[in-house]
Image: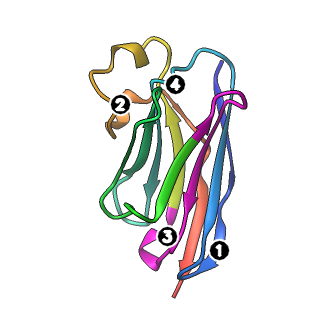
């Protein structure tokens, strides 16, 4: 069984920084594509950043240049460094990975929620102006 346990997050003033962590336990997940999503109140969940097994990264336009996704394969961990935060970044943030049954068959690493089988419990990020 795969579990994703998130930590980090919290409240910060605009312009501040936060770092989210996501540690995976269990072995039946694919590192082909690992991602961060977020969901703001009253809005649909959206993809924020993803990272492929070769280290290639992709970001939503709204966070490019401010957020950095990284991973530590030895620690089975995924990170999201968030800098220059603004009120629009306020949301619940989730990490997500596909299973071993799904990951190898993905045509590309994107932000399609159905591609991800395991999700973290969510971490609240609140940015005040």
Q: Where residue 34 sits: x, y (%)?
A: 48, 34
Query: Is residue 40 toward the left or the right of residue 60 in the image?
Result: right
The circle on residue 11 is: 1
Quick one: SS at disc 1? strand
Which residue has dot 4 on it?
31
The residue depicted at 35 percent of the width and 62 percent of the height is: 43
Residue picked out by circle 2: 114
Spatial separation of the CA atoms under disc 2 and disc 1:
30 Å
Q: Give the foreground label among 1 and 4.
A: 4
Q: From the image, state whether disc 3 or disc 4 is nearer to you.
A: 4
Check contact, mark 1 vs mark 3: CB within 8 A: no
**Residue 1: x and y, percent?**
66, 18
Residue 106: which quarter of the image?
A: top left
**Among numbered discs 3 and 2, the one appearing first in the sequence:** 3
Residue in the picture at 58% in, 66% down: 125
| Side (left or right) of 120 relative to 105 | right
Q: Judging from the image, what secondary structure is the residue with disc 4 in?
A: loop
Q: Read off the magenta span.
A: 71-91
Q: Do tag 3 and tag 2 residues touch (Cβ < 8 Å)? A: no
- Looking at the rendered structure, the secondary structure element under dot 2 is helix
Q: How many marks?
A: 4
Mark toward the start of the polypeptide (1 vs 3): 1
- Observer-side mark, 2 or 4, equals 4
Q: Which mark is residue 90?
A: 3
Q: CA distance from mark 3 to mark 2?
A: 24 Å
- Residue 63 x/y as whole percent: 39, 62
Can you say whether 64 is above or below 23 in the image? below
In the displayed structure, would residue 77 be above or below residue 47? above
Q: Residue at x 54, y 68 (%)?
A: 83
Numbered disc in front, either 2 or 1: 1
């Amino acid at each position: 069984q795969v579990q994703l346990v998130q930590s980090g997050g919290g409240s910060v003033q605009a312009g501040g920084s936060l770092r989210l962590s996501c540690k995976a336990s269990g072995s039946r997940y694919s590192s082909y594509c690992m991602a961060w999503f977020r969901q703001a109140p009253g809005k649909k969940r959206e993809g924020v950043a993803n990272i492929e097994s070769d280290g290639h990264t992709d970001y939503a336009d709204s966070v490019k240049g401010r957020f950095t996704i990284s991973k530590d394969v030895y620690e089975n961990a995924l990170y999201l460094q968030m800098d220059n935060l603004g009120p629009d970044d306020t949301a619940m943030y989730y990490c997500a990975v596909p299973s071993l049954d799904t990951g190898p068959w993905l045509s590309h690493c994107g932000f399609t929620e159905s591609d991800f089988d395991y999700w973290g419990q969510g971490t609240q990020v609140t940015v005040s102006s």
